[in-house]
Image (tube, helix red, strand yellow):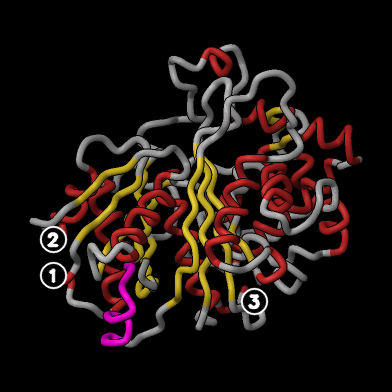
Amino acid sequence: MRDVYLLGVGMTKFGKYPEIPIEHLGRNAVFEAIKDANINPVEIESAYCGHAFQGSTAGQRVLVELGLTGFPITNLENACASGSTAFREAFYAVASGRNDISLAIGIENLSNKFKGALGPDETDLEAKMGLTMPALYAMRAKRYMYEFGLKKEHLASISVKNHKNALENDRAMFGAKITINEVLKSKMIADPLHKYDCNPVSDGASAALLVSKKVAKQVGGRPIKVLASALTSGKYEPGFINMTFEDITNRCALSAYKTAGVGPEDIDFAEVHDCFTIAEILRVEGIGFCNPGEMISWIEEGKTEINGYKPINPSGGLIGKGHPLGATGVAQMFEIARQLRNEAGDRQINNPRIGLAHCRGGAVAGTEGAACAVHILMKE
């Protein structure tokens, strides 16, 4: 396996754009990534496009807008982890020696397809009977409260942090100085989760160019080394289900740490899949930053703040930045690159060297989840 470098990133501002075709959103993100990498676009040898609801040949529809045709373009659907899966495939295209330059794209326009929360799949009987994502994560929060003493104020603190981080992110959908009290007074979605505990329906696109060491040396720029790309799926869960610890996240993180030759103590910051405030707690513990139940004290001590011990979601996360399903995983790479290059402005972490991105997607009845991806990147 060859060394792989993230050379260029691009991202639209996340928001609600029902009138903008996904081809145009994707085109803008890819064009920015090409400019950022400073490469000739005709040198791109393959592309992988992650999305969930954008129809047939979405990647081809995006790239023809830029005149990029005639090379392998693969479309991937893996729920919320679709973009992360596209990034992984582009990574392995370069790592295996098949290509020297590969493009990962994440796209999604949800606001012209869904008026409210995303509905369950027709075959998911549990969700049809009420076990939708908000209900599932509300149950997880309730169980965590019972086992560890979590309070609604702890959950609200995560929303306050992520909205504050998003306020300094020019690509984020939201950004506000909200208070714990404002979170607790927002509309109840599924007790104990309020509106501000949940990520919004969003539209947007992101892109990343991955290259070999040879290309990185030729082009120069600000390459970021990709140390590991891990992807796993949920195991079948007969009997009792532990709702306060994510085995799928833990297994994926351990695989990434083994490949990268680092441990959680070596990671300076992380972007994690905070679809709900309780999810940030479960994922930080799942990737091994702290033990189950310890996130309560971490929140109280400010350890996950921008200037804390382990900054979490400096971009604003899904709650502040937005969550256009397929675009989220690649957008995490945009934030990792900005931070490692010291280009994050007022939300810049103090001299980070290694960043981690965690993205989990989907639910399959009878299993612990559909997909989970963990990537580790390093500034050399």
Q: Quadrant of the rendered structure where residue 142 is? A: top right
Residue at image location 74% in from the left, 74% down from the top:
307
Expressed as whole percent of the image width and height from the top left, the position of residue 119 reads 48, 24
Residue at image location 72% in from the left, 42% down from the top:
278
**Does the magenta run of residues contain 312?**
no
Label 2 element class: loop
Say whether residue 222 is left or right of residue 292. left
Q: Nearer the viewer, residue 130 or 267?
A: 267
Q: Main secondary structure of the magenta part?
A: helix
Residue 42's label in the rendered image is 1
From this view, report whether residue 58 is shown above or below residue 63.
above
Residue 68's label in the rendered image is 2
Distance between the Cα atoms at labels 1 and 2? 7 Å
Disc 3 residue type (three-letter) = Ile
Say whether residue 245 is left or right of residue 216. right
Distance between the Cα atoms at labels 3 and 1? 35 Å
Label 1 element class: helix
Residue 349's label in the rendered image is 3
Expressed as whole percent of the image width and height from the top left, the position of residue 158 reads 73, 53
Q: Quadrant of the rendered structure where residue 209 is? A: bottom left
Say whether residue 111 is left or right of residue 183. left
Which residues are the magenta region? 209-219
- Quadrant in which the N terminus appears: bottom left
